[in-house]
Amino acid sequence: MKTMKARLQMLPILAASAASAADVTWVLGSGGASCDLTCVSRSGCSEDAWPKTDAEFYDISKLAGQVCESTQTGSAKYDPSTDGRYCGWKGPEDMPKEETRCSQSADSSTYRFCPCNSDKEL
């Protein structure tokens, strides 16, 4: 009984940590656009929703309508991103405190997966 009670108490914590990526709308931005720009008409970009695993990114890429021919870990400030065929999912380990991942942009042939706060354009 104690084990079952302990498991039930952990469920809200697990759900809360997994919910951040699910509580946003994933949008594939235009080439070179930051997620701040991509999400401006969707109540902004969520800094708390970045994927933490490649499996989580796989689900995100499907939600955004992108099929990745192959996926690498990445680590660029603008990841997760794609060039239209290949994807990189994990952002940098250490981001300067004065910068946000949402504000990063890349060259015009790179498209970012962006966690927007709303599914409807304002």
Image (cartoon, helix red, strand yellow):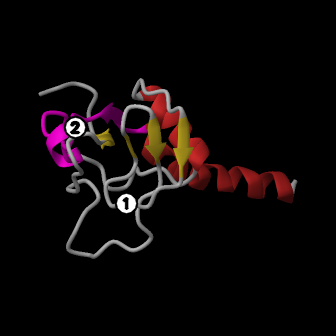
Q: Residues within 10 Å of mark 2 (few under 14, many from 20)?
A: some
Q: Most prominent secondary structure in the magenta stretch?
A: loop
Location of residue 64 by image quarter: top left
Question: Helix, strand, or loop for circle 2?
Answer: loop
Residue nearest the viewer, comparing 58 with 83 = 83
Q: Which mark is residue 52?
A: none
Question: Any magenta on residue 103?
Answer: no
Residue type at the position of mark 2: Gly
Q: Report x, y in % for residue 34.
A: 20, 47
Question: Any magenta on residue 33?
Answer: yes
Q: In which quadrant will I find the C terminus?
A: top left
Q: Which residue in the structure is indicated by mark 2?
A: 31
Location of residue 101 by image quarter: bottom left
Q: Which residue in the structure is indicated by mark 1?
A: 76
Residue located farthest toward the right when viewing the structure as drawn: 1
Q: Report x, y in % for residue 55.
A: 61, 43
Decide: is 119 above or below 109.
above
- Identified at 50% across, 33% down, the residue is 68
Residue nearest the viewer, comparing 78 with 63 = 78
Question: Helix, strand, or loop for circle 1?
Answer: loop
Which residues, given as a range, are shown in magenta?
A: 23-44
Decide: is 44 above or below 26.
below
Residue type at the position of mark 1: Ala
Q: Is residue 100 visible?
A: yes
